[in-house]
Amino acid sequence: MKIINYKLKNNIYDDSRLGILIDDDIIDPNLIFQSHYKSAGYFNYIERSNHNMPTSLSKLLNNFDNPIEHLKNSLKLAKDLKINSHLNISEVELLSPIDKLTSYRDFYAHEKHVKVGFKKRNEDVPAPWYEMPVFYKGNTAGFIGNNQEIIWPSYSDKLDYELELAIIISKDGQNIKKEDAIKHIFGFTILNDVSARDIQKKEMMVRLGPSKGKDFCSILGPVIVTIDEFDFKEPNLLMQAFINGDKWSEGNSGDSKFSFTEMIEFASKDEWVRSGDLLGSGTVGTGCGLEIDKWIKPGDTIELKVQSIGSLINTVGKKRNS
C-alpha cells in the first residue's frame, strides 16, 4: 500500500487525513469505517469510526498492534460494502505522509558519501564509523511534504539537498535484536535532509551538532510504501536526484554499510524505539551538492526519485530576511 497524509485543496484549515493511494485515486479508511457503522445503524458512527480507524497515521501506529493489516481490512470492507466513493489525487494536497513524528534519527550509513566529506576536511574516515551506525537527532517539527516550498533560512548562504531513504517505525521496543527488527518497520519513504552547509560546517568545527544547519526544514514523501510490498525485506532501490530536470545524483539504497535492522538494533540499546519514529539512512553516494560541488539556488526544482516509491518534488524558496 502507498500511504499518504492529505488535505483538500483550497481548504483554509490545516486538518489532514490518512489516505491510501491506489493509482490516482485516494481511499480514506476512516470514511470507509463511517459508512460501515452508519449502514449498521449506529447513531455515533463518526465517533466509532474515529476510534477504530483514526484519521491520523501517528495515532494508528501508536494504538494498533498491526496497522498494515488494519489498513488492508479497510480496503476489504470497502469492497464488501461496494463503496466506490473516492477522491482523485488532483483534488488534494499531499502533506508529509505522517502527521506527527515521535522522534527523528538520521544515520550516516553510506560510505561513499562519508568518505567524500572527510576527504574535503583532509581527514580519514574514523575507525568508529565502521563499528557502529552513528546518527544525529533532528527536529520533528520542521517537516514539509511534496510540492511544498523549501525554506531558505536567513542565516545561510549555501543550501543543499540530501537524497535519502527512510523508514517509519510501527512497533515499540527496547534492546531489539537485528533478526527481529524487521517486524518494527511500517514502511519506506523518501527523505530530503535539507542542509545549510555553511552554518553546519561551523557547528561541526566545535564537534557538536548539527542543529541550525539542519532543523529548519526536512522533507518526506510523497508516500510511505508499506513493508509488505517488499515481502517484509529491506529493498535495494535505485535512488536519483534531478535539479531542474538534470540528473545530479544516482545511487542505490543497498550500498549502505549498515542495514535498517542494524540501525534499529543500535538505536534501541537501553532506550525506546517507538511507533511513529523516523529513521533516515543518511545520504546515498553522490546524493548531495557537497559531494559533487554543485549548488542549488532559489527557484530551483528538486526531484528526488526512488524506485518503487515515487518522486518527491519541491521548489527552493528565496532566502528569508533576518
Image (cartoon, rainbow, N blue to C red):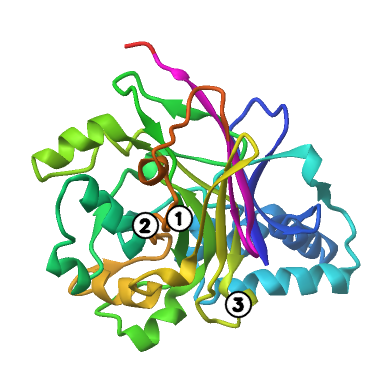
Main secondary structure of the magenta stretch: strand
**Helix, strand or loop status at disc 3:** helix
Sequence-first tag of 1 and 3: 1
Would you say residue 281 is visible in this rendering? Answer: yes
Sequence-first tag of 2 and 3: 3
Left or right? Give the position of 231 relative to 120: right
Please determine whether, in this image, residue 56 is positioned above or below residue 263.
above
Left or right? Give the position of 70 relative to 177: right
Q: Which residue in the structure is indicated by mark 3?
A: 230
Q: Is residue 318 magenta?
A: yes
Please determine whether, in this image, residue 301 is positioned above or below residue 288.
above
Q: Which residue in the structure is indicated by mark 2?
A: 282
Verify CB contact (< 8 Å) between mark 1 and mark 2: yes
Determine the CA span between mark 1 and mark 2: 6 Å
**Helix, strand or loop status at disc 1:** strand
Q: What span is colored magenta in the figure?
A: 302-320
Residue 153 x %, y %? 36, 24
Residue type beneath disc 2: Gly
Along the viewing direction, whichever of 302 and 134 lies nearer the viewer: 302
Along the viewing direction, whichever of 145 and 301 lies nearer the viewer: 301
Q: Is residue 171 magenta?
A: no
Locate the C terminus by quadrant. top left
Residue occupying the far left of the picture: 206
Q: Label 2 crowding class (10 Å Cα cut-off): few <14, some 14-19, many 20+? A: many
